[in-house]
Amino acid sequence: MSDWTPRLAEASKPLYIAIAEAIARDIRHGTLSPGDRLPPQRKLAAQLGLDFTTVSRAYAEAQARGLLESHVGRGTFVAGEPSAHEAPDPARVGAEDLSMNMPPEPTDPALLARMQEGLGYISANLVHLLRYQAPTGGEKDRVAASTWLSLRGMVPNLERIAVTPGAHATMTSVLSLLAQPGDTVLCERITYPGLRNIAGRMRIRLHGIEMDRHGILPDALDAAIRQVRPRALYLNPTLQNPTTITIPTDRRLEISEVLNRHGLGLIEDDAYGFIPPRAPAPLAILAPDLTWHIGGLAKCIGAGLRLAFAVAPTSKDAFALGQALRALAVMPSPLSMALATHWIENGTADRIRRFIRAETRARQQIAAEALEGFRFDAAENAFNIWLALPKRISRADIVARMSGRQIGIVPSDAFTVGGPPNEALRICLGGSATRDALRSDLHFLANTLVPNTYMG
């Protein structure tokens, strides 16, 4: 294969990256096989009309991704097949927390191969990534974060951006800056349970704001601010967990007007904002001086990264956030941070996001068909549905009957702030379950929702 010549289609990328990705593509397609020898660097440079340095960088990049092996005096070869010790560890295959709202998992071999290529980059930088680093990420990682946030229309300067060890750590740190034990924070009446857990441990009171099908009511927000004198408002405004509500632009404008009038800070949890193709602009754009924006990567790339990209209202606030994060978690994992940055730079992160977008749409269609006739809230790209139970069916009964199934079911108790919980369940459609397994479990659920049909 010494006559191999790459096809350089993506002119928008640096040429050395384009060559490395052509190597990866041809390995995936079988044009290049393990053990094939690539052309000498000077020969390939002459064939492509490029300088030697560009081709040398390309080979080095491909080697860092684990695609190539270089042998002095012999040349550069396509790396061999993964060894037996690189096979999946059975002890980790079943490690899945069904109480979490998980994205569907990639199964496409080409996408998986592209994701695995990033581990070669990690390996090449391993020693450096085992060091203590800055509590809010290095400049390279914050530049990548800025690139990712631009997908939501945000262009904050780097001094306001923090790479953090996940949305939970970020929320905890922000709340530690805004509130003291005994203070009140506003949120949706049906809200993200992670906020409830964090507030409970910090002894912060939550006050739920009434909602309609467009999110919290601006008049109710205004009244609550006047009555309870809160320290902040928390919102999960796009594909809200668990109701799947997305606050439309007009309502966002009304909410931002109330916040600006009272000068109340906002914690905007934009966990799902990167998934829909046309999500409304973040509230951080409408009220930038008041908003702590948290763009978590758990839902749009993968929870195991434990990373989020936060934007503080000011550079001074970002510094304070960094100090709070240092006290809480020291720093985001440099290994995860380097992998996420590499995936953003070479386009892998966006491919994962687009896979999740397409797969959630397909799974919502499966849910609509399997649960036809039952009442539930859903949205095209949501990870879950919010199921209202029929009369004479209790949430505790359904949770017990569905025990052992592959889909995650969480009762309304976990989400309710103020007042008794409704008879409702969050049904997660993601995780490791295949479409067929999901369809089977949802049909089983449909049978349990009909009184007197469950046979044990």
Image (spheres, rainbow, N blue to C red):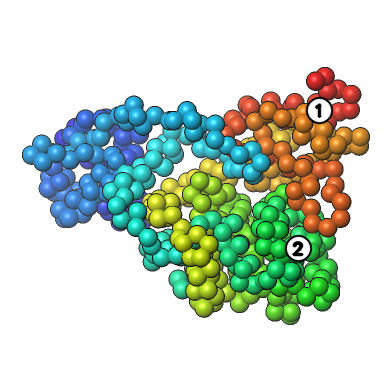
Q: Is residue 173 above or below residue 391?
A: below
Instruction: Describe residue 104's horizontal placement relative to residue 232 as left or right.
Output: left
Residue at screen point 25% across, 44% down: 63
Q: Identify residue for label 2.
A: 206
Q: Nearer the viewer, residue 197 or 80?
A: 197
- Disc 2 element: strand
Q: Nearer the viewer, residue 231 or 451?
A: 231
Q: How many marks?
A: 2
Residue 275 pos. (x, y %):
59, 51
Residue 180 pos. (x, y %):
68, 71
Q: Identify residue for label 1.
A: 448
Residue 4: quadrant of the picture: top left
Amino acid carrying mark 2 in the image: Leu
Residue 451: quadrant of the picture: top right
Amino acid carrying mark 1 in the image: Thr
Mark 2: few/some/many CA within 10 Å (<14, 14-19, 20+): many
Instruction: Describe residue 212's horizontal placement relative to residue 136 as left or right.
Output: right
Q: Is residue 415 above or below residue 27?
A: below
Mark 1: few/some/many CA within 10 Å (<14, 14-19, 20+): some
Residue at screen point 59% across, 43% down: 103
- Disc 1 element: helix
In the displayed orientation, state which residue is furthest to the left: 73
Q: Residue 144: tell me if it is visible.
A: yes
Q: Quadrant of the N terminus?
A: top left
Give me the C-alpha separation between circle 2 and circle 1: 34 Å
Q: Residue 143: tell me if it is visible.
A: no
Residue at screen point 78% across, 75% down: 229
